[in-house]
Image (tube, helix red, strand yellow):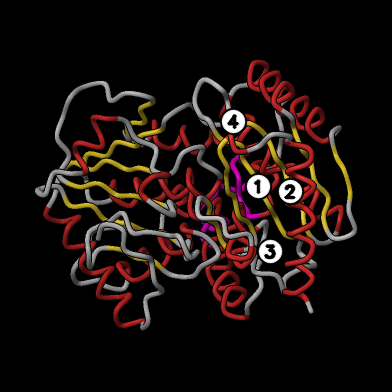
């Protein structure tokens, strides 16, 4: 489905047919490679682990690929993988091997997939089935999976869609009678993505989003509590999960405070512009993975402080990219704004996201003065946001 724009699955019947096709592929194939997007966030990491655990139910060989180690607060998810014999590899695959199926999760478009040359070659092999599960439906969202095997739908998170798959498969008792789908670790992984991407539901706008968030969070919250031993120190509720994924390490806290010290304010938007020299300083001190995730956290904080929008701008690691990154987030009080329309208004092609959060980038050599450029972008965003909220 090369260069085909993602569209919402129109009916529940079609959604169920796609789930059934994916389950048939799972039964027929034996070795699976799971991919997410570059600089993975909570939902991406959780969906990789959740889908790996689902495949594990069928006794399949599963490998999760990550371009770099993830932040410390997700260590419990990686510990679950280790406990269940799920391989997690970084940077390069340890051995040249062939996978019979690839799953691309929570990734808006192919160019954002975290992969290497070896994996890219696997993805071009027509004998390898590529499936996709994702909740991004921005104007520039493009399919990465094979036609008929892409579960793409509006949802609070990709983990919600994996939860949907799980519930549908569990109903096929005659077909999967020996499989216990409702285990604690699978519930924990799904719940992590659901509460993390929506910030405990507060960034959801439509009735449909809120309805399905409530249904799925309640199902998996109840399951997690039911399956967790009393008086144990294990996570037993979605509130506890949310607290853990919000925690910063000492290094993360220092990075966050350093970025937040650069805050500027406008009426509709609070923003941070990290110039070229300061960006290089941050990357040298903290590394790419941490900077990317802290910038998202800072955008969330700015949005909530402002009550409307939060923006963080920074130069990419000069050794890896020639772009300047922009991350925009809306607050829980500003739900009328679908930020994807701002991408259209700014005529941005290299960007994407979902209604509550978008990211885009511009080439460094196109920007003479980052401070002036950012102020111009802020002015345009304020104008567009005013039109949206009118």
Q: Work out whether 44 lies above or below 249.
A: below
Q: Which residue is mark 4?
A: 316
SS for callout 2: strand
Q: Quadrant of residue 383?
A: bottom right
Instruction: Say which quadrant the N terminus sits in.
Output: bottom left
Residue receiving disc 2 = 311
What kind of secondary structure does the magenta stretch mostly adopt? Answer: loop
Q: Residues within 10 Å of mark 3 (few under 14, many from 20)?
A: many
**Label 4 packing within 10 angstroms: few (<14), some (14-19), many (20+):** many
- Provide residue 338's location: percent of width, then percent of height: 64, 69
Whether residues under marks 1 and 3 lie with C-beta atoms below 8 angstroms apart, the answer is: no
- The reply to whether callout 2 and callout 3 are in contact (CB within 8 Å) is no
Report the Cα–Cα distance between label 4 and label 3: 27 Å
Left or right: residue 110 compared with residue 335: left
Residue at the disc numbered 3: 203
Question: Is 322 or 85 nearer to us in this picture?
Answer: 322
First of labels 2, 4 by sequence position: 2
On-image quarter of the C terminus: bottom right
Q: Is residue 191 magenta?
A: no
Determine the residue positioned at 19% across, 38% down: 122
- Snapshot quadrant of residue 4: bottom left
Of marks 4 and 3, which one's residue comes earlier in the chain? 3
Q: Do the CB atoms of the residues marked 2 and 1 lie less than 8 Å apart?
A: yes
């Amino acid at each position: 489905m090369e260069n085909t724009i993602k569209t919402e699955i129109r009916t529940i019947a079609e959604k169920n047919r796609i789930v059934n096709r994916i389950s048939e592929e799972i039964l027929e194939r034996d070795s699976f490679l799971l991919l997410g997007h570059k600089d993975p966030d909570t939902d991406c990491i959780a969906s990789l682990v959740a889908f790996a655990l689902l495949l594990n139910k069928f006794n399949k060989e599963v490998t999760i690929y990550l371009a770099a180690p993830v932040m410390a607060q997700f260590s419990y998810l990686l510990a679950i993988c280790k406990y269940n014999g799920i391989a997690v590899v970084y940077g390069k695959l340890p051995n040249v091997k062939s996978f019979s199926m690839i799953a691309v999760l929570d990734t808006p478009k192919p160019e954002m997939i975290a992969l290497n040359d070896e994996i890219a070659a696997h993805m071009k092999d027509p004998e390898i089935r590529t499936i996709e599960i994702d909740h991004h439906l921005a104007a520039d969202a493009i399919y990465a999976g094979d036609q008929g095997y892409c579960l793409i739908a509006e949802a609070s998170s990709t983990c919600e869609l994996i939860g949907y798959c799980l519930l549908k498969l569990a109903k096929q008792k005659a077909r999967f009678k020996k499989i216990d789908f409702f285990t604690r670790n699978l519930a924990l992984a799904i719940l992590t993505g659901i509460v993390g991407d929506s910030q405990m539901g507060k960034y959801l706008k439509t009735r449909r989003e809120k309805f399905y968030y409530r249904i799925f969070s309640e199902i998996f919250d109840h399951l997690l509590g039911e399956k967790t031993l009393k008086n144990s120190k294990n996570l037993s509720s979605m509130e506890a999960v949310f607290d853990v994924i919000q925690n910063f390490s000492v290094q993360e806290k220092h990075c966050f405070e350093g970025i937040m010290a650069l805050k500027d304010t406008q009426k509709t938007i609070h923003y941070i512009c990290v110039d070229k020299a300061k960006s290089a300083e941050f990357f040298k001190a903290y590394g790419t993975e941490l900077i990317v995730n802290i910038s998202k956290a800072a955008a969330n904080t700015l949005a909530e402080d402002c009550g409307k929008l939060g923006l963080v701008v920074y130069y990419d690691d000069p050794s890896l990219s020639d772009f300047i990154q922009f991350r925009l987030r809306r607050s829980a009080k500003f739900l009328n704004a679908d930020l994807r329309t701002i991408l259209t208004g700014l005529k941005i092609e290299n960007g994407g996201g979902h209604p509550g959060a978008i990211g885009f980038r511009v080439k460094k050599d196109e920007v003479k003065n980052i401070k002036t450029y950012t102020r111009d972008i802020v002015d345009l965003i304020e104008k567009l946001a005013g039109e949206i909220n009118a």
